[in-house]
Amino acid sequence: MRPRKRALVATLLVSGLAWAASAAPTPDQIKQATQQVLSQRMYQLDDTRYYRFDLSWLRELIVRLLRPVFQAIGVASPSVFWTIVGVLMVVLIALLVHMVYSFYIALRPRAPAVVTLETTPTPDSATLAAEAQALADVGNYADACRRLFYAALAELEAKRKGRFMSGLTNTEYLHTFRTPWVLENLKTIVDLLNLKWYRDMTFEVNDYAQCAAAFERLENRLQQET
């Protein structure tokens, strides 16, 4: 190698070593760089503000979606824009709450309905039977048969220590009893009332006689059971 080239190579080696020595960071430089890194937002572990959710993406999404619509209808003011957005958000939240509440009401188990029957004091059966006979004497056999039905119920309710259940139909009332001889005699009166009273048919004297005979059988059997 020529002397000039050897001198040039030696010069370059010395320069390279000097640059490498000067490029290596000192401990102070490393410490300073570390402090700068740790001072960034993601490393601020003691400040709870940095744990908050960043909802800037939602704001940008709302702006992108609604700004063309509001610009089309002539809303350019930022304050007016965000006022309308706030109102729409309130309406949306109210609708969501209403939907959730409606689903809750629809799916909530409901308590079974409690059925109560209207009751009235039990009248005196002897008084009702006397009224029935008085009505029959003047030819009002329809009301006379009804009075005998009430007199029979009064006797039966007195026997089982119950009260009149005025909310029941005649047939429903009949089915509240289970004793065969009660059902047999009471059904005679109920069938006549269902056949003629509710079809607006004329009651004859024979109809009243059948009801009176059924009532008498009931009354006699109840006296025997006492």
Image: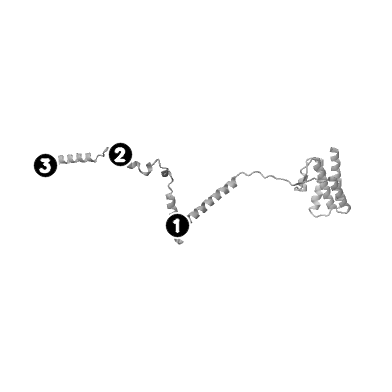
Q: Quadrant of the C terminus?
A: top right
Q: Which mark is residue 195?
A: none
Q: CA distance from mark 3 to mark 2?
A: 44 Å
For this rendering, which residue is in front, 95 or 137?
A: 95
Q: Residue at x 58, y 46 (%)?
A: 104
Question: Please, what is the three-letter code of the amino acid marked with disc 3?
Answer: Arg
State the residue position of label 3: 4
Q: Could you say whether the residue bearing mark 3 is in a helix, strand or loop?
A: helix
Question: Which is nearer the N-term, disc 1 or disc 3?
Answer: 3
Residues at badges 1 and 2 in contact (C-beta under 8 Å)?
no
Question: Please, what is the three-letter code of the amino acid marked with disc 2?
Answer: Lys
Using a 10 Å C-alpha cutoff, classify the residue at mark 1 as few (fewer than 14 neighbours), some (14 to 19) or many (20 or more): few
Q: Could you say whether the residue bearing mark 2 is in a helix, strand or loop?
A: helix
Using a 10 Å C-alpha cutoff, classify the residue at mark 2 as few (fewer than 14 neighbours), some (14 to 19) or many (20 or more): few
Q: Position of residue 172 (x, y in %)?
A: 76, 46
State the residue position of label 2: 31
Q: Could you say whether the residue bearing mark 1 is in a helix, strand or loop?
A: helix
Number of numbered discs overlaid on the protein picture:
3
Q: Position of residue 91 (x, y in %)?
A: 52, 53
Whether residue 2 is visible: no
State the residue position of label 1: 79
Q: Quadrant of the N terminus?
A: top left
